[in-house]
């Protein structure tokens, strides 16, 4: 008890030791730079408080996405019209989902699920025609198979036929094959990211009951626009089509734009939290999500599949965040310091919102919000390591499955 109470004194002692360094840093800067730093800090604090309020009012994320759209449009003044249209439409479409009702049970229809799956398949076909990637045929087959299994299973349950063995075995095969298929793609950044999103869309579609595949598709399109946005601002980086994932050896200090990128990353994580439901509420989880995989009640297996579905959007966002850092040659682990700062601001707010009076629901909800914010950094660190593994490894070093030829140079990747 006494050791715990003495921890703040130890932390403030460390802060006071660094105070001279902070004062000297302020003296070396002019007044305008100091005002910019203070202004940016205020904006980040207000933005963190908005993310706190999003736990209670999901529509605030929609409003923030609209403001983010306007900010990105301002930054994209020198870019092509196609890039601007891509950013605007993806931002506005993504802002719709936090304002929609929470997905509960079998609240969707075959039309909505078919639309989401069809868009994924159509995207794969279009990219296949553009890049001549033979492996995209396999990708299209996996997406098409998952869509057929989902709709077939839904129809079986509507007619009270239950889960067939064919659909269950097919679901488990697709669940295993789709993620492994990622490691057969080249390490070229844009190509690897596209196949990561498509491969993760397969199990996500199998675990969907409503507009979740459509949400993941819009999220993927917005991440593509965000990658272009981050590559277009700051210093020139060259053609991203020729860049590959690799280790970052630079040891640069964190700048204001690095904190901005960390904040946007955490904001997108919140959008994934509340895009199709309320992860902070147990009432948002439904056993019907896993009906393509489980015929009998199995709490641990069902819980694992539900967690997998919840984390898939996080993985896509983290992979794109890692890609922006690789392109900018900024160590991603350093940027986690920025994520930690914003997370601590939110965690401190939730600490004061913890209740010990009232109904058990209010007390449990307040505690769960605080626990989520305390553990989210650890979860994101784990997700980042997985994302780093997904983006930095492949099975075939000589690209025996893929034969991607550039239309301009005729070279093979």
Image (cartoon, rainbow, N blue to C red):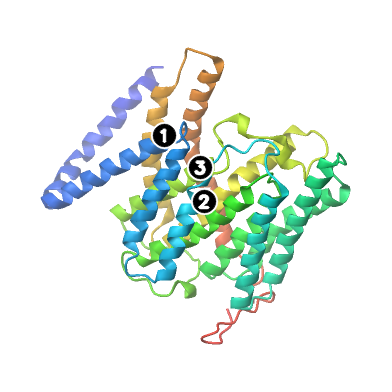
Let me know if residue 391 appears in the view: yes
Which residue position is annotated with label 3?
98
User: Above or below — where is 344 with respect to 217?
Assistant: above
The image quadrant of residue 311 is top right
| Disc number for residue 335 | none
Relative image position of residue 199 (x, y in whole percent): 65, 59
Q: Secondary structure at mark 2?
A: helix
175 with respect to 233 (left or right): right
338 with respect to 164 (left or right): left
Q: Earlier in the sequence, mark 3 or mark 1?
A: 1
Q: Secondary structure at mark 3?
A: helix
Q: Nearer the viewer, residue 215 or 34?
A: 215
Q: Secondary structure at mark 1?
A: helix
Which residue position is annotated with label 1?
52
Question: How far apart, in angstroms, are the residues tagged by discs 2 and 1?
Answer: 23 Å
Question: How far apart, in angstroms, are the residues tagged by discs 3 and 1?
Answer: 14 Å
Q: Nearer the viewer, residue 395 or 342?
A: 342
The image quadrant of residue 277 is top right
Relative image position of residue 274 (x, y in whole percent): 52, 40
Relative image position of residue 28 (x, y in whole percent): 12, 52
Q: Earlier in the sequence, mark 2 or mark 1?
A: 1
Q: Quadrant of the N terminus?
A: top left
Residue at 49 percent across and 62 percent down: it is 224
Q: Nearer the viewer, mark 2 or mark 1?
A: 1
The image quadrant of residue 15 is top left
| Disc number for residue 384 | 2
Does the residue at mark 3 contact the one at mark 1 (Cβ under 8 Å)? no
Residue at 45 percent across and 71 percent down: it is 240
Residue at 37 percent across and 17 percent down: it is 2
Q: Nearer the viewer, mark 3 or mark 2?
A: 3
Q: Residues within 10 Å of mark 1 (few under 14, many from 20)?
A: many
User: Above or below — where is 357 with respect to 344?
Assistant: above
């Amino acid at each position: 008890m006494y050791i715990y109470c003495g921890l703040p004194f130890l932390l403030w002692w460390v802060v006071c030791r660094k105070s001279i360094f902070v004062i000297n840093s302020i003296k070396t800067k002019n007044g305008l730079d100091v005002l910019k730093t203070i202004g940016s800090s205020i904006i980040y604090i207000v933005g963190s408080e908005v993310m706190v309020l999003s736990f209670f009012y999901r529509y605030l994320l929609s409003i923030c996405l609209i403001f983010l759209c306007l900010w990105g449009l301002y930054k994209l003044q020198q870019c092509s019209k196609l890039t601007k249209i891509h950013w605007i439409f993806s931002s506005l479409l993504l802002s719709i989902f936090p304002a929609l009702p929470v997905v509960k049970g079998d609240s969707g229809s075959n039309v909505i699920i078919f639309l989401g799956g069809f868009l994924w398949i159509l995207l794969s076909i279009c990219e296949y025609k553009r890049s001549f990637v033979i492996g995209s045929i396999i990708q299209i087959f996996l997406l098409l198979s998952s869509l057929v299994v989902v709709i077939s299973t839904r129809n079986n349950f509507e007619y009270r036929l239950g889960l067939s063995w064919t659909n269950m075995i097919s679901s488990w095969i697709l669940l295993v094959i789709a993620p492994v298929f990622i490691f057969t793609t080249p390490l070229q950044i844009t190509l690897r990211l596209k196949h990561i999103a498509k491969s993760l869309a397969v199990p996500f579609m199998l675990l969907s009951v409503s507009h979740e595949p459509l949400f993941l598709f819009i999220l993927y399109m917005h991440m593509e626009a965000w990658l272009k946005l981050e590559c277009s601002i700051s210093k020139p980086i060259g053609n991203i089509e020729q860049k590959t994932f690799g280790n970052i050896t630079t040891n640069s200090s964190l700048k204001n734009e690095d904190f901005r990128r960390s904040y946007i990353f955490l904001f997108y994580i919140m959008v994934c939290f509340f895009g199709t439901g309320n992860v902070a509420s147990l009432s948002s989880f439904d056993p019907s999500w896993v009906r393509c995989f489980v015929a009998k009640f199995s709490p641990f297996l069902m819980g694992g599949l539900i967690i997998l579905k919840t984390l898939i959007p996080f993985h896509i966002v983290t992979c794109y965040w890692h890609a922006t850092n690789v392109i900018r040659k900024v160590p991603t682990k350093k940027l986690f310091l920025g994520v930690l700062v914003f997370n601590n601001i939110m965690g401190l707010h939730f600490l004061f919102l913890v209740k010990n009076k009232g109904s058990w629901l209010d007390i449990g909800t307040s505690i769960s919000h605080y626990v989520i914010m305390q553990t989210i950094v650890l979860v994101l660190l784990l997700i980042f390591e997985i994302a780093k593994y997904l983006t930095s490894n492949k099975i075939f070093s000589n690209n025996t499955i893929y034969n991607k030829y550039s239309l301009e140079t005729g070279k093979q990747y």
